[in-house]
Image: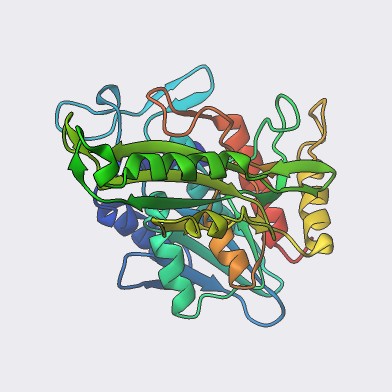
Amino acid sequence: MSVRELTRDLVSIPSHQDETAAGDYVEDWLRRETDADVTRDEVGNVIARRGTGGESLALVGHHDVVDPAASQLDAGGGYVVDEREGRLYGRGAADMKGAVAAAMLAFRDADPAGELVFASFVGEEVGGVGARHAIEHGFAPDYAVVGEGSTNYSGPDVTDVAVAHRGRRGSTITARGTAAHASEPDAGENAIYLATDAVEAIRDLEAPRVTVAGEPLEGQVTVTEIDGGSGINVVPESCTLTVDERTVPGERVDLETVADLPGVEWRVDQDLPPMRCGDDRFAERVLEVARAVQSDVSNPPELVTKPHATDAGWLAQAGTECVVYGPSEPGEAHTATESVSIRVLERCLETYRRLASAET
C-alpha cells in the first residue's frame, strides 16, 4: 500500500465528532501490517512500539479533524476525497492524516536502532486531550518527530524542520461594578468603564520576543471579544473580555498586572504550551536527513519556527525533545479546499523511515 492510498483511506473516514472509526482503522492496520505491541487507551489514542534498548524515537500525529465544510461531505455524511494535479483534497488531508499515513508506513518499514514508537492521538484540535492523557499515563519518548505542517516555510517546494513554535493562552477578564439607573450614573460603578481600563492596560503590555535558529518568534496579546450591559438605561454591573495570547518559549505577557486593577478578575481558560527543541544534536540530525531526502530541491530545508501550537508543546513540556516535520503547507489546514501534495507525502515517508532506522 502506498502513502497515497493509505492517506485516501484515512481521509475518507469521518473523525470530526467521533474519532473511533479512524482509530479503529489505524489500530487494525498496525496489528495486521506489523509485529509491534499495539495499544488503544481509554480515550482512543493508538500507540505502537517496536524495538528495544537505546533512545526512544516517536513518530507522532493525530487522527481527529475540525468540522468539514459542506463541500467536503458526500450525500451520506462521509468525507469526499479527490485527487487532481498531484494533490489529495479532503478534510484532514493536510491536518494531518497524510502525515499519519506516512508515519504508519515508516514505522512498519524502518529497522530501528532502539525503541521506535508510533502514536496517533485524539483531541488535538480541542486542546491536546489525547496527548495530555498519554503523558499523564507514562508516554515519555526521548525524542519525537511531530508530523504537523512544516512545508514551504523557508521557501517554495521544501519541507523544513521546525524547532520551535508558539503556544496559546486564552483568558477571560471580568469587570464587576454596581448597577444603577442610567439617569443617576454616579450611584453605581460602571463595569464597562472598568473593562476599558483593562483593555488599555493590555494594549500597553509588551509582548515577548525570542530568537530561535536565527529567526524571531514573537508573542502577541489581543482582546478579541467584549460583552457587557443589560439595557440602555442601566449602568452595567458586569462586563467580560476574552483575550487571545500567543506565547513563546520561556516568556509570558504579564497579564497578572491587569488582574490587579480594581474590580477586575482574570481566569485562564486554555493554555497550550509553546515548544522549543533543546537538543541541537537531534535537530541537526533531522535536518541532515531532511536535506539528504530533498537533495533534488533548489532550496535545501532549514531550521525554522512555526506560529501554531501543536501536540509537540505538551510533549516538550513533559521532557521529550521535539521537532515538527510534516507535509502541510501554510494556508491549507482547516480550509474548505484543504489538500496535500502526494510528492511531499512520499518525501515525509522517506524522511521518517530514515530517521527511524538504524542506518541513520
**Residue 292 coordinates in the image, percent (x, y):** 81, 43
Q: Is residue 120 visible?
A: yes
Classify 8 as above or below 32. above
Occupied quadrant, residue 298: top right
Q: Nearer the viewer, residue 36 or 261?
A: 261
Q: Nearer the viewer, residue 108 or 340?
A: 340
Q: Is residue 37 visible?
A: no
**Residue 79 coordinates in the image, percent (x, y):** 28, 33
Residue at position x 44%, y 56% in the image: 262
Q: How many marks?
A: 0
Q: Nearer the viewer, residue 324 or 178?
A: 178
Classify 47 as above or below 330. below
Residue at position x 70%, y 48% in the image: 208
Classify 297 as above or below 13. above
Q: How is the image coloured?
A: rainbow
Residue at position x 21%, y 34% in the image: 182
* Left or right, 264 with reference to 306: left
* Left or right, 232 with reference to 222: left
Q: Nearer the viewer, residue 231 or 117?
A: 231
Query: Quarter of the image containing the C terminus?
Result: bottom right
**Residue 328 coordinates in the image, percent (x, y):** 56, 36
Residue at position x 37%, y 24% in the image: 336
* Left or right, 87 with reference to 229: right
**Residue 311 coordinates in the image, percent (x, y):** 52, 57
